[in-house]
């Protein structure tokens, strides 16, 4: 089990981002955690080893990442997985056939697909609710409810869930509050401070930040819960490889430098778009016109670089996507480079049309992941692409 080094929790966020979970390598004192490319570890004698037996169970590079992110979230134990969805899948293995989960209706498309197309057939049941309203969460809880899973802000509609209210409902029901913290990152939002029990990420996004790996990570505070996840991590085996762990670890060292710039660019671009297209067409929790701006400000310390705009029709959306030059047309988010995408046809294509429409993910919606380039170039790019639209 990868428990954080206690003294790492004492320092500030930036210091933790750079140092937490990492100690000079014992052979030569290398300051950077090596990529431990090994499947097994030589044992001193029967039943005598250095704490490492086989690399599915433990790998020092992966452990450094797990400790690092656990320290950033203010948790105690981290578990790095091969992808964000592998992470959710393994978390769900805490539960058994017959158990019930209340899930945000607007969670990541791949999370919904995993629940609806795979896990539902194994006997877990899911109720999808609009988690913006805590009463709807409470109303969906049954005696079989074991977890409430929320994502805040959501993708791509930037809806906010009141984490403290959701944690209270979960705790009262004897269930876990599980939070997908991918969009905000621990730099802007730390769900444990609001009472969450499990926090997870697609490290593919802001934590890595450089669009060069796929990964997921779960963090918990409770030791017993950590033991159960540790068992699943090894028994189901969807673990993160050492090289991808190293890339993510390299990424988290600059999280506290990147996030303020994503936020600064996000705010500037959202304000400019609101002026250019009208408040009602721009969805960004940092805009005072966002219906949940006050709640966002209460539980987040910044809003990041994710903005959605509604251009009204698929044709207008397609025109914008075809004209941008600095923004790249691609799925994913959270990297240093700016991306633009069309949720209905890309990230949410696996969500049936009827459901997409009910959720408000219309064909005119375009999602921007504002990177850390010069904001003037990003604004000029959007200006030329929006000409005549
Ligand atoms: C990308 C993403 C996931 C899934 O992660 P992968 O690393 O792509 O498997 C889960 N949740 C959110 C919010 C995401 O953006």
Image (tube, rainbow, N blue to C red):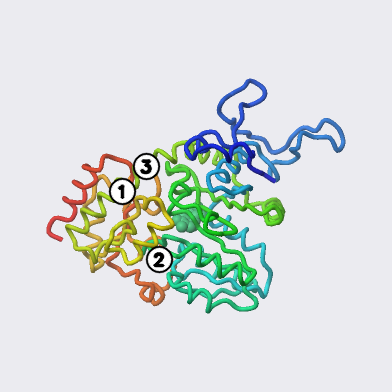
Label 2 Cα neighbours within 10 Å, binned few <14 / some 14-19 / many ≥20: few
The local secondary structure at tag 2 comes to: loop
365 on left or right of 381 = right
The circle on residue 18 is: none
Q: Which residue is depicted at the point 25% across and 62% down?
A: 317
Q: Are marks 3 and 2 in contact (CB under 8 Å)?
A: no
Quadrant of the snapshot with the C terminus: bottom left
In front: label 3 or label 2: 3
Q: Is residue 107 visible?
A: yes
Determine the CA span between mark 3 and mark 2: 25 Å
Q: Which residue is depicted at the point 60% across and 75% down?
A: 125
Specify which label sits upstream in the sequence, 1 or 2.
Answer: 1
Specify which label sits upstream in the sequence, 3 or 2.
Answer: 3
Determine the CA span between mark 1 and mark 3: 12 Å
Q: Residue furthest right?
A: 46
The circle on residue 328 is: 1
In front: label 1 or label 3: 3
Determine the CA span between mark 1 and mark 2: 19 Å
Label 3 Cα neighbours within 10 Å, binned few <14 / some 14-19 / many ≥20: many
Label 1 Cα neighbours within 10 Å, binned few <14 / some 14-19 / many ≥20: some
The circle on residue 349 is: 2
Q: Is residue 121 visible?
A: no
Residue on which the image places disc 3: 336
Residue 246 percent location from the top left of the image: 55, 37
């Amino acid at each position: 089990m990868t428990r954080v080094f206690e003294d790492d929790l004492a320092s500030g966020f930036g210091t933790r981002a750079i140092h937490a979970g990492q100690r000079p390598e014992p052979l030569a004192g290398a300051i950077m955690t090596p990529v431990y490319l090994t499947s097994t570890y030589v044992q001193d004698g029967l039943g005598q080893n250095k704490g490492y037996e086989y690399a599915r169970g433990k790998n020092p590079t992966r452990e450094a990442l797990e400790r690092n992110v656990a320290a950033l979230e203010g948790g105690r134990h981290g578990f790095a997985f091969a992808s964000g969805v592998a992470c959710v899948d393994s978390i769900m293995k805490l539960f058994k056939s017959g158990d019930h989960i209340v899930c945000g209706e607007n969670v990541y498309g791949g999370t919904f697909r995993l629940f609806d197309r795979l896990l539902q057939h194994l006997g877990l049941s899911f109720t999808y609710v609009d988690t913006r309203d805590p009463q709807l969460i409470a109303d969906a809880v049954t005696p079989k409810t074991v977890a409430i899973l929320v994502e805040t802000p959501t993708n791509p509609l930037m809806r906010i869930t009141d984490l403290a209210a959701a944690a209270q409902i979960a705790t009262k029901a004897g269930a876990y509050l599980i939070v997908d913290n991918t969009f905000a990152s621990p730099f802007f939002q730390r769900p444990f401070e609001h009472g969450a029990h499990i926090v997870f990420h697609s490290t593919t996004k802001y934590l890595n930040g450089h669009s060069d790996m796929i990964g997921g990570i779960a963090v918990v505070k409770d030791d017993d819960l950590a033991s159960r996840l540790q068992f699943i991590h090894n028994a189901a085996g969807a673990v993160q490889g050492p090289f991808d762990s190293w890339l993510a670890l390299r990424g988290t060292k600059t999280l506290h430098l990147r996030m303020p710039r994503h936020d600064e660019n996000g705010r500037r671009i959202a304000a400019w778009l609101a002026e250019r297209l009208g408040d009602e067409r721009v969805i960004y929790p940092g805009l005072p016109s966002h219906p949940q701006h006050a709640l966002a400000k209460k539980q987040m310390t910044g809003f990041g670089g994710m903005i959605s705009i509604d251009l009204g029709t698929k044709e207008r959306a397609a025109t914008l996507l075809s004209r941008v030059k600095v923004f790249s047309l691609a799925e994913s988010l959270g990297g240093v480079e700016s991306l633009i995408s069309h949720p209905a046809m890309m990230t949410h294509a696996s969500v049936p049309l009827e459901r997409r429409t009910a959720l408000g993910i219309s064909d005119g919606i375009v999602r921007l992941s504002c990177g850390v380039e010069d904001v003037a170039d990003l604004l000029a790019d959007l200006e030329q692409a929006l000409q005549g639209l």
